[in-house]
Image: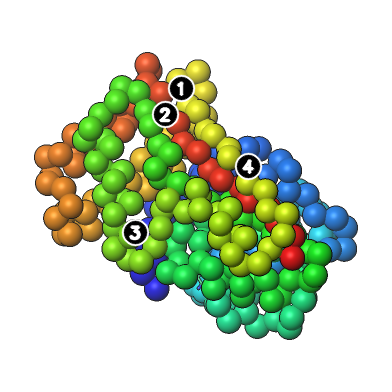
Amino acid sequence: MDYVHGYSNRENSRLHDQANTLTELLHHDTIYPPGSRVLEAGCGVGAQTVILARNSPEASIISIDISNESIEKARQLADNEGLKNVAFQVADIFELPFKDETFEHVFICFVLEHLKNPLDALQSVKRVLKKGGSITVIEGDHGSCYFYPRSEEGMRTIKCLIDIQELLGCNSLIGRELYPLLNRAGFKNVRISPRMVYVDSSKPDLVEGFTKNTFNAMVEGIREQALQFQLIDEKTWDKGISDLYRAAGQDGTFCYTFFKGTAIK
Ligand SMILES: C[S@@+](CC[C@H](N)C(=O)[O-])C[C@H]1O[C@@H](n2cnc3c(N)ncnc32)[C@H](O)[C@@H]1O
């Protein structure tokens, strides 16, 4: 799989920073009832899994990912956290090893943007969801990013990330598309809730956990690919990255919008 961010240690800690910083914003309204069976598709290293499991301690969560290595890390994390209501399994979202209508709920976070055919993935999870069950999908949209002081070079580095994902057949602008995608997949009662993160230096946790360690780290991670594909020259790249960090400085500000979609089968 051409997973743009890769599976390095730095990417693992980036995913944990992202999840921890955004817990309240993205998870506060996802609570599953006791006894319900929840499928988390594309759990990665378990960054969202531990939050899901803590918020719904009496729900039974099955988290799958295509990466064996990530599943091992997720399992270790859940063990370390003493979580008893999660099971992990290596599986492909397009060929789920579950019978039709196995789960009451499905949760997917930051996965569709990396798939060449997100609609097929939604239809695949719909198969294993019970009639009347819910799906929750959370995705970002890199086109929603703006910051102060503005910088053309900074915007160009972000555009490189968007373009590289597109070259790999993925879509980092997928947040704005959740509504049509969920409808096309045949779900009902589709509701989209945009969740904006606004960061300035009065929120040092967000400056570190979101602007620097989540967003800027993600853009920086594609440096070699951006230069290799000749999407940008080195000088413009370096200035752009430095300007993104400038927006995380004392008088800088940074905005990004996530999209959380819910729907019913
Ligand atoms: C950006 S990570 C997100 C992980 C986690 N949901 C989170 O928010 O921290 C995307 C994950 O999707 C997984 N993935 C990609 N294609 C997949 C597929 N076909 N089936 C299952 N998982 C897949 C990747 O292995 C990766 O762990």
First reached walking from the N terminus: tag 2 or tag 4? 4
User: Does residue 39 appear anywhere in the picture?
Assistant: yes
Element marked by disc 3: helix
**Is disc 2 in contact with disc 3, using a CB cutoff of under 8 Å?**
no
**Amino acid type at image mark 3:** Gln
Q: Which residue does the image show at 36% across and 66% down from the upper left?
A: 169
**Is disc 2 in contact with disc 4, using a CB cutoff of under 8 Å?**
no
Between marks 3 and 4 in the image, the one whose residue lies nearer the viewer: 4
**Amino acid type at image mark 4:** Ser
Residue assigned mark 1: 200
First reached walking from the N terminus: tag 2 or tag 1? 1
Residue assigned mark 4: 193
Between marks 2 and 4 in the image, the one whose residue lies nearer the viewer: 4
**Residue lying at the far right of the rendered structure:** 34
- Compared to residue 157, the image places residue 182 above or below, namely below
First reached walking from the N terminus: tag 3 or tag 1? 3
